Image (spheres, rainbow, N blue to C red):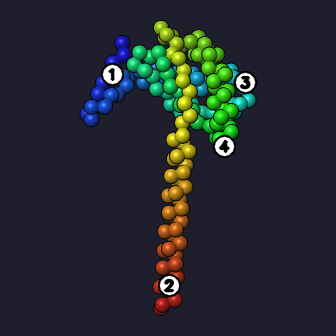
Amino acid sequence: MCIINRDENGDLVMSQRKEKVAQRIKEEISIIIHDKIKDPRIGFLTITKVELTSDLRTAKAFYSVLGEDDKKKEAREGLKSANKYIRKLLGDTMELRYTPEIIFKLDTSTEYNLHIGMIFDKIEKERLEKEEKGNDDQKTDS
């Protein structure tokens, strides 16, 4: 039985079983994609997270792809093409009453985090340059 709880803020929280099933699905999909799928469009792809509906019948599998937009589009097409095969193999390895329908979604959080990191690096570099300039000004004043 899947239990949905609420945290102290009143937000819905996944039950422990649902979390375990989602984690296992993530691992199994990753293995299937890397070991069983030979589609070159998929390339270097990482399953970052899986979210399940409360009835465990639908799984949103978030993935990230290194590369430009054309690589992401190719990966999306490769996953779309292999979706039924991935679901069948998932059903063969998982002991669930129903094999969830898999919806693949591009996870852009990795790119966003890299972008934010680059902004912080730029700010830090500018701060250091400003400090060095300030220290140089103090040396010339003395």
* Type of amino acid under label 1: Ile
Task: Please report the residue visible at 53 percent of the width from the left and 65 percent of the height from the top.
Answer: 125
Residue hosting label 4: 68
State the image coordinates of residue 46 (x, y, percent, origin top left). Answer: 60, 33
User: Could you tell me residue 49's position as x and y percent?
Assistant: 50, 31
Q: Secondary structure at mark 1?
A: loop
The answer to which of marks 2 and 3 sits earlier in the sequence is 3
Density class for disc 2 (Cα within 10 Å; few <14, some 14-19, many ≥20) is few
Ranked by sequence position, the earlier of labels 3 and 4 is: 3
Name the spot of residue 52 as percent of width and height, x first. Answer: 45, 22
Residue that numbered label 3 is attached to: 38
Above-or-below relation of 11 to 82: below
N-terminal-most mark, 3 or 1: 1
> Relative to the observer, which residue lies in front, 109 or 138?
109
Q: Which residue is mark 1?
A: 4
Q: Is residue 23 visible?
A: no
Cα gap from disc 2 to disc 4, whole angstroms: 44 Å
* Residue in view at x 60 percent, y 13 percent: 88
Which numbered disc, 1 or 4, marks the residue that appears first in the sequence? Answer: 1
* C-alpha span from label 1 to label 4: 39 Å
Q: Badge 3 local density, few (<14 within 10 Å), some, or many (20+)? A: few
- Residue type of the residue flagged with mark 2: Asp
Residue plotted at (31% across, 31% down)? 11
Spatial CA span between label 1 and label 2: 62 Å
Check whether the beta carbons of the residues at disc 1 and disc 4 lie within 8 A of each other. Answer: no
Q: Quadrant of residue 5?
A: top left
